[in-house]
Image (spheres, rainbow, N blue to C red):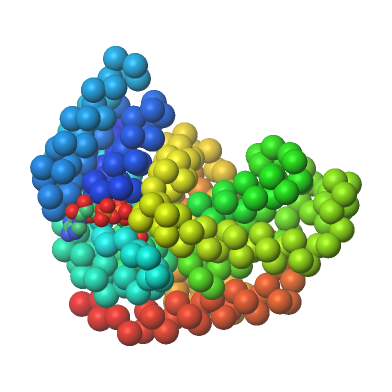
Amino acid sequence: MAVEVNHRKVAIIGAGFVGSATAFALSQSGLFSEMVLIDADHDKAEGEAMDISHGAPFNKPMKIYAGDYDDVADAAIVVVTAGAGQKPGETRLDLVHKNVGIFKSIIPEIAKRDFGGILLIVANPVDVLTLAALKLSGLPEERVIGSGTVLDSARLKTELGLHLGIDSRSVHAFIIGEHGDSEIAAFSSANVSGIPLNDFCEMRGHFEHEKSEKAIAERVKNAAYEIIKRKHATYYGVAVAVKRICEVIVRDEKSILPVSHMMHGEYGIDGVCLSMPSVVGADGLETKVPISLDEDEIKALQESARTLKEVVDSIDFN
Ligand SMILES: NC(=O)c1ccc[n+]([C@@H]2O[C@H](COP(=O)([O-])OP(=O)(O)OC[C@H]3O[C@@H](n4cnc5c(N)ncnc54)[C@H](O)[C@@H]3O)[C@@H](O)[C@H]2O)c1
């Protein structure tokens, strides 16, 4: 029997750049009243918890502390950010064996405490690690999701908003597939408040659709490399993406987010986790949303899945 869930509690495993930025974003959100940070370096977790908790008089009340795995059992969401990050020039898939090793020491600790909440994977390569978390935890698939391309889709909307001179929140567009080099910008279904993207571009004086789409998709795909080249890590963007996913779960919003999840034959893809838009709510992933894709996008998605499958097949999950 799973432990009763405390819907006001979140746990963050890994208090590095991403974990601490996420903790800070959550401390500002008012979503939770308790947050526990866990890190192999306990002092680091403790220092971050102390620092963030000193904002208490300016925020909604929240107990913030460094803990251990006994503290995660009743959390509504456990966010896993522990793992090595990309160094300049490294791809996300280069991190796989190191970070699967780290997951083997983390995920069973959560599972054996009869955790009843949602496991949200953020460490990279996030799609492979979401699958690893599924296998290592034995939790139901709907309760194990990866942050996937939620950040990449935000980057795409940001770029399109800038390109068109409009509020990025009026842009509906998804990056799908791997959170990584084989990701796909699904332009064929992109729209601005219901107006097909190309029509809206023309309204705003842009007519070279193919050229612009290619440049924007490349900028989105390479965003992490460009940031890492300059500041050696990325963390603020992902932190607010994780905050948004937590919000959707805690408030049972049933919003559509491109989270990473297990595929079962959709678009001919099976046995890998990758991102496709899905309805997310209090129980995790509720319904997969089969957005329409053109032939090239389907081909690229299948290629993305093949890339991930090759990596997954090289891993010993035991
Ligand atoms: N999904 C995304 O969109 C996204 C975006 C940015 C970064 N990331 C990924 O997030 C991960 C963390 O990045 P970072 O910049 O915070 O790295 P970091 O090195 O700053 O932090 C990693 C933390 O994990 C801890 N850790 C390592 N092994 C552990 C274990 N077994 N148990 C508990 N804690 C452990 C380390 O002590 C460290 O504090 C990386 O894999 C990175 O690629 C993902």
**Viewer-proximal residue among 97 and 210:** 210
Give the camera-side residue of 18 and 186: 18
In the rendered image, residue 216, in percent from the top left (x then y), is placed at 66, 59
Q: Quadrant of the C terminus?
A: bottom left
- Along the line of sight, the residue nearer the viewer: 1 or 84: 84
In which of the image's four quarters is ligand 1 placed? bottom left
Q: Position of residue 7 (x, y in %)?
A: 33, 34
- At 62% from the left edge and 76% from the top edge, which residue is drawn? 300
Q: Which residue occupies 25% across, 81% down?
A: 316
- Residue at 53 percent across and 63 percent down: it is 222
Give coordinates of residue 176: x percent, y percent: 58, 63
Instruction: Judge by depth and name the residue closer to the eye, 66 or 161.
Output: 161
Q: Quadrant of residue 141?
A: bottom left
Q: Position of residue 192 (x, y in %)?
A: 76, 46
The structure residue drawn at horizontal position 87% and vertical position 49%, both measured from the top left corner, is 205
Q: Can residue 245 be seen here?
A: no
